[in-house]
Image (cartoon, grey):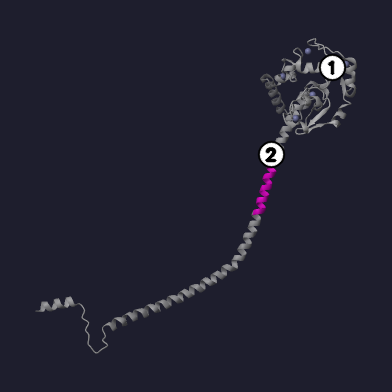
Amino acid sequence: MVGYRVQNKESFNPDYSCPCCSLILRDPVQLIDCGHRICQSCANEQEGDIITCSECHEKTNRNKLLIDRGFKNDMQILPVVCSLCNWTGILNIYQNHLDQNHQNPTCDSCGQKFSSVNNLDRHIQYDCEKTTVDCLLKQFGCQEMILQINLSKHYLSEQHQHVLMNVVRHLKSISSNDIYKHLQIPSETTINHRQRTDNETIQLQEIDEIIKVLLDGVETLNDDLQRLSNESVHHKNLLDSLTPNLSTLKISMEEQNRYLDGIKINQEVLQQDIESMTQKLNDMKTSSYDGTLMWKIINVQEKMGQQLRNY
Ligand SMILES: [Zn+2]
Ligand SMILES: [Zn+2]
Ligand SMILES: [Zn+2]
Ligand SMILES: [Zn+2]
Ligand SMILES: [Zn+2]
């Protein structure tokens, strides 16, 4: 199954179309990790436990799909125009209309017959080799005739990307206030709205990120300031407590100096004592204690020389 094909899809809020099949959502399920919605049947067609979002390529585990009944209820009253006739009604009864009025539809482009509108829609979206569509950027110069089945390939092509770049540059060059006036975007280019909104959202997110980083920086600076202020108070206290110690230290140093001076004087006295003692000792060496007269003859060699010369 695929979503609902309608003639007036482009007049709808882009949120109502499925990024997988590009049609109006049928039984929307929300991918919890990115918030985008796809048809339940489109989710079922992806194999494996991981569902890749066609809109943003975020991967969501299959058990994290949320059947979005609220969204489905909101969509029930959307006014739709039948893709195969000019019937109009609300989405709620559209399938009923298709089942009753278009039982064996034929592909306009290739002539192939189908057993249900849903099979036809699937054929047009994924298989038909004749159905062509206009590029959504046709009004900006992307004129190529594109096969429906090649549409996603076309959006990735260099030629289309080039046009897209020009559009983005153009949008950037005019102020956001003037965008609506200048562009007068027709309903076919709802996707441009979305792309532009996405661009703006990305820019806003970037600014948001920058503000967050700046806020973090300011917080860090505040913390540093607080810490430094605490430290300075601590240092001041330490200094205050050290000041009386300093004068005590000064007094004790002066005392020590006086003590040292005293010691110096004592030392000088001691030195003098030692010198006089040495003198006494020398004198004592020439004294006799047992009545024997002792001569101390000094310079014997010289005196002998003198005597010898006298003879
Ligand atoms: Zn779908
Ligand atoms: Zn997504
Ligand atoms: Zn119809
Ligand atoms: Zn066909
Ligand atoms: Zn294009």
Quarter of the image with the N terminus in it: top right
Residue 166 to residue 224: above or below = above
Which residue has dot 2 on it? 210
| C-alpha span from label 1 to label 2 | 50 Å
Front one among 298 and 251: 298
Ligand 3 - quadrant of the structure image: top right
Is 122 left or right of 203, judged from the image as shown? Answer: right
The image shows residue 75 at horizontal and vertical percentages of: 86, 27
Front one among 127 and 178: 127
Span of residues in magenta: 209-227
Residue 182 visible to an observer of this rendering: no
Question: Which label was assigned to residue 117?
Answer: 1
Would you say residue 248 sits in the magenta stretch?
Answer: no
Residue sitting at the far front: 48
Look at the magenta stretch and give its main secondary structure.
helix
The image shows residue 51 at horizontal and vertical percentages of: 74, 29
Residue contact between numbered discs 1 and 2, judged by CB atoms under 8 Å: no
Residue at 65% x, 53% y is 227
Would you say residue 224 sits in the magenta stretch?
Answer: yes
Q: Is mark 2 within 8 Å of ligand 2?
A: no
- Under circle 1, the secondary element is helix
**The residue under label 1 is which amino acid type?**
Val
